[in-house]
Amino acid sequence: MTVIKRMFAGLLVLGSAVFAIMIIFQNPSKPSLKNKVFEYESLPTQSPVSANDYNKTFQDISKAIATELAKANPQGPTVIDGQEGVATVEPEKVADTILAQGFQSVDLKDFDPDVLLSDLKIIKTGDKLLAENYLKNFRAILEKNFSVSGIDFQNPKAENWRSLAKIYQKAIDQFYSLNVPENLATLHQRQIKLMTIQKNIFESLANYENDPFKAFIAASALKETENQLQALSKNFTDVAQKNGLSI
């Protein structure tokens, strides 16, 4: 099951779009620069979406509820038995409808990108030296790009997420340039795919003002992507140990 399918399954279990959004903000996933294949120190991080973003979204929902209330009372308040009154709407249902429509409008391709084996430089050989050089180059790319980023996550802003996305894109481009042993090709393909998802997540967070619903989906997908990278790390380690590769 893909990252995005798992995320949506979780939202459906919650049963309420409003509650789902609250969960994302109250228990946010934290993006990590720690390499899941070759461990080294990660940078300090905070919530992927700020409290201001949280407040703005619910302000927008409140405005939408007010609009629906006005639609239900086109002539304004009515007088019944000498008392002014208005036809009411159910705020939770209106909010759920607004959020559901917003989620349905999001293009999810960025969270399930295609990474073709035909685009990789696969070498059909069982040469041990090539495999060891590949793993060393793999580690060097991650260490060079992620050990220090210069990004301050104490008060994350859109430019922080854009900068992080650029770091990921640079590393992804370098991964594509590596000569990959055939027996490691599918793992390499998976690593690029997951890092591309992370890059797209950070771009979505940076673009919050223009597409808040996609940013919410991105924030909720972070943890699942991290978990899959951690599992992939073990796959790489197992292959290296099984084949006696020095890394």
Image: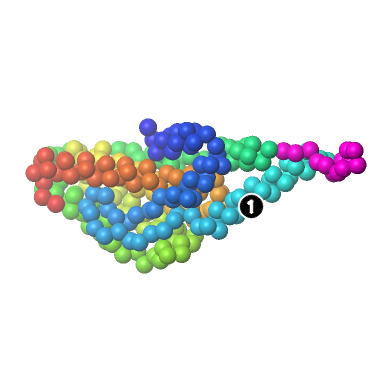
Q: Which residue is drawn at 11% across and 46% down?
A: 245
Q: Which of 119 and 137 is in front in this view?
A: 137
Q: Position of residue 101 (x, y in %)?
A: 60, 38
Which one is nearer the viewer's eye here, 115 or 220? 220
Q: Where is residue 89 in the image (x, y as percent from the top left)?
A: 72, 38
**Is 138 included in the stretch rendered in magenta?**
no
Q: Which of 48 and 242 is in front in this view?
A: 48
Mark 1, residue position? 59
Q: Which residue is drawn at 45% across and 45% down?
A: 220
Residue 27 image offset from top left, x and y in percent: 44, 49
Residue at the spot 68% in from the left edge and 38% down from the top edge: 90
Residue ID at (78%, 40%) = 71
Q: What stretch is highlighted in magenta?
A: 76-89
Residue 146 appears in which quarter of the rendering? Answer: bottom left
Q: Residue 159: where, in percent of width, then height? A: 47, 62
Q: Within 10 Å of the Cα at label 1, are there few (<14), some (14-19), or many (20+) other Cα atoms?
A: few
Looking at the rendering, which quadrant does residue 221 occupy? top left
- In the figure, 143 relative to 234: above or below? below
Tell which of 164 and 128 is nearer to you. Answer: 164
Instruction: Classify residue 63 as left or right of residue 146.
Output: right
Residue 224 as seen in the image, left or right of residue 177 = right
Check residue 80 for magenta coloring.
Answer: yes
Disc 1 marks which amino acid? Gln
Q: In which quarter of the image is the N terminus?
A: top left
Question: Hey, which residue is sitting farthest left in the picture?
Answer: 244
Residue 123 at least partly seen: no
